[in-house]
Image: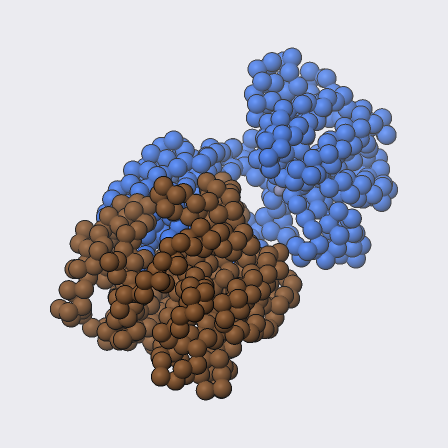
Chain colours: A blue, B brown
Amino acid sequence: MVAPKPFLDYIDSNVPKFIDRLAEAVAIPSISGDASRREDVKKMAQWLEAQLNKVGVKTAAIPLGKQHIEGQVLDLPPAIVGRIGEDPKKKTILIYGHFDVQPADKSDGWNTEPFKMQFDKEKGIMYGRGTTDDKGPIMGWLNVLEAHHALGVELPVNLRFCFEGMEESGSEGLDDFIVSEAKKGAQGWFGGVDCVCISDNYWLNTRTPALTYGLRGLVYFNLAVSGPGADLHSGAFGGAVYEPMTALIALLGQLVTQDGRILIPGVYDGINAASDEELEIYKNLDYSVDDLEAAAGGKIAVSDDKSTVLMARMRNPSLSIHGIEGAFSGAGAKTVIPAKVGGKFSIRLVPPQRADDIRVKVEKYLKEEFAKLKTKCKLDVEYLHGGIPWVADHKHWNYEAAKIATEVR
Amino acid sequence: MVAPKPFLDYIDSNVPKFIDRLAEAVAIPSISGDASRREDVKKMAQWLEAQLNKVGVKTAAIPLGKQHIEGQVLDLPPAIVGRIGEDPKKKTILIYGHFDVQPADKSDGWNTEPFKMQFDKEKGIMYGRGTTDDKGPIMGWLNVLEAHHALGVELPVNLRFCFEGMEESGSEGLDDFIVSEAKKGAQGWFGGVDCVCISDNYWLNTRTPALTYGLRGLVYFNLAVSGPGADLHSGAFGGAVYEPMTALIALLGQLVTQDGRILIPGVYDGINAASDEELEIYKNLDYSVDDLEAAAGGKIAVSDDKSTVLMARMRNPSLSIHGIEGAFSGAGAKTVIPAKVGGKFSIRLVPPQRADDIRVKVEKYLKEEFAKLKTKCKLDVEYLHGGIPWVADHKHWNYEAAKIATEVR
Ligand SMILES: [Zn+2]
Ligand SMILES: [Zn+2]
Ligand SMILES: [Zn+2]
Ligand SMILES: [Zn+2]
């Protein structure tokens, strides 16, 4: 179904106004991870609520409790929820987005002021923090709502909104709210919702939009290895003692091969090989190994085969070593034997992997490998957090509708 | 030769005064590594020079040039040189010490104010930054000089002094001064020196003083492994790219066994096994594996055999892995694939190992091992700095004199 002509005309003739509105949103530095910007995140929430009200959406600002950050106790920014349309004959769609952003500063390498949006008309590109993640997509919904409101045209679906201001900082507070709201059933803000549209996703590359129908899960570990009572000087102790770093490095070296095969026994249990139908999808995606390497900024793809790379990225588990806490991490040279070091790594999970099962396998394997080292240092395998993998049916009517909606005619 | 009785009586009767003088020195927070304390290091230099002058030592404050630190350009603290005694029939001894200290703060775990010296009379222990390293030993020389001066007793040797204020920060500026002064021969501050006494050394343990007659050298490396153009998110790239951390961890794992055997081919070339005479020394030293583990704060000695541990500590090369630059090193969990990481490690050297030779062997080995990994990441082996190992003849008259001087009668 193509959008009606008056709607398209309204959008086309209001482009400058829509761009100005996005610039207005970008100008509010709503950085959720920076305590000193918390008031800006709240300001952004108020701004968004007012915009929604103007186009006929009934809203509420939901307090999400307190946050302990940088030694202070701060209010979490409220979630902004909204609803428009109450027709039981229509589908009800819940829209998710976030109005907070990551930090940005010219000194990080920006060519323009990150919170002063620049529009390059020739290239059709807007520069500014949040233009794409995730203020731009939210503005897209405001534009749609405004067009219907101004033209007096009825929306084809009932819409519900859930916009948060902590996405870039772990969505603190949102889970609890969603769970308690869902329990209210028809009485809650999410009552009657038929499906969800998450307006905060990647494109496949710089050419082709994508519909995300799965997300890998996560288990994150800290391998804490300890030995001496305090950091030692390598001149005085080097050679005479078992060193935690030597043990940790050996252990981290037992996790994954250079080309990404995870060495933990049983970690691949239950994962099906891709069906011919699934393989066909990868083959036909507008994607190349060059795209991946351009995005990564280096010639480092694990394979020259497009499907292999796509599956490695999207449907296989993977293991990454992130760093070491407690060791020397500065520039220059320091001759320290660190007393206690923590090796951080995580595994991306895919269905049917479960965090609890993988956790048991990881702990068993690492304790066994550590015992083989015959060091006098001690190991503690700490599980830091996890998230379940998720995959949806991309033939669901919601995806079919989205496919049509994103087609260029 | 026992010291003459009037000298010993003077020392005994002036203990409270000597302790007060040390407290006065400790009270000046002459932290060389902290730019904001530079004036205190200079103040400490002036204080010391005045003390030396009072007891008849001719001195000079030697400017050592500028230092670039924390974005500022600062004067280096001067070296204080001195001389007393010009008798050509006597030996001439050069005394070295340093009047700067490491940082210290109650929040580091001190039980007392680090720059307000406390004297526990019952235990005979003084608490304060610099009481042992290295203001205390310098005060020892002042006490000796004062006793001779007050009693009108001639010193048995000519003394020369070289006290610096940058020892805890790499002795910046001192090398150049010593080299240029040595070139002046008899005209220089170090002209006619027969031997050197370094008043800044370890005891063997908490019971027994020691005479240091050797010091291991050092080669320090950074293994820089790079791949992506910027840090990547493991959710989006994990599995699809070769990761620099995976390669670095594998490489660091090829350096040394858990019990300290260095795996670099040729690294032990030319190192002699200990002679029976040398083995006898280790056997008779007042030292135990418990001493080592008490000092290290953990049951982590590489052996239960005292001589093995002593040799590992004093006469064998060793390899320590210090940490990783560029990876995640904070608390908590961050799902980053670091783009460029630097693995820091160093090798302690013993004669006849030479830094230049070891450096060649390390680079050859690591490049070969890296090639075996078949990663698409890149390796750069950076040599950061080195120091030559040193061993002296412990039967030299200087050591024989020191043995007698440190005997308890
Ligand atoms: Zn986002
Ligand atoms: Zn984001
Ligand atoms: Zn010292
Ligand atoms: Zn020191």
Q: In this rendering, is residue B229 above or below B177? A: above
Q: Quadrant of residue A378?
A: top left
Q: Is residue A251 left or right of residue A386?
A: left
Can residue B174 be seen here?
A: no
Q: Quadrant of residue A259?
A: bottom left
Q: In this rendering, is residue A317 above or below B363? A: above
Determine the residue positioned at 45% across, 87% down: B186
Q: Number of marks in the image?
A: 0
Can residue A368 be seen here?
A: yes
Determine the residue positioned at 46% across, 75% down: B84
Q: Is residue B372 left or right of residue A206?
A: left
Residue A306: x percent and y percent? 49, 54
Residue B182: x percent and y percent? 46, 83
For the C terminus of chain A, give its image quadrant.
Answer: top right
The answer to which of B154 and A13 lies nearer the viewer is B154
Determine the residue positioned at 33% across, 68% down: B215
For the N terminus of chain A, give its image quadrant.
Answer: top right
Residue A95: x percent and y percent? 66, 29
Determine the residue positioned at 37% across, 55% down: B12
The answer to which of A182 and A148 lies nearer the viewer is A182
The answer to which of A134 and A392 lies nearer the viewer is A134
Residue B103: x percent and y percent? 51, 53
The answer to which of A48 and A191 lies nearer the viewer is A48
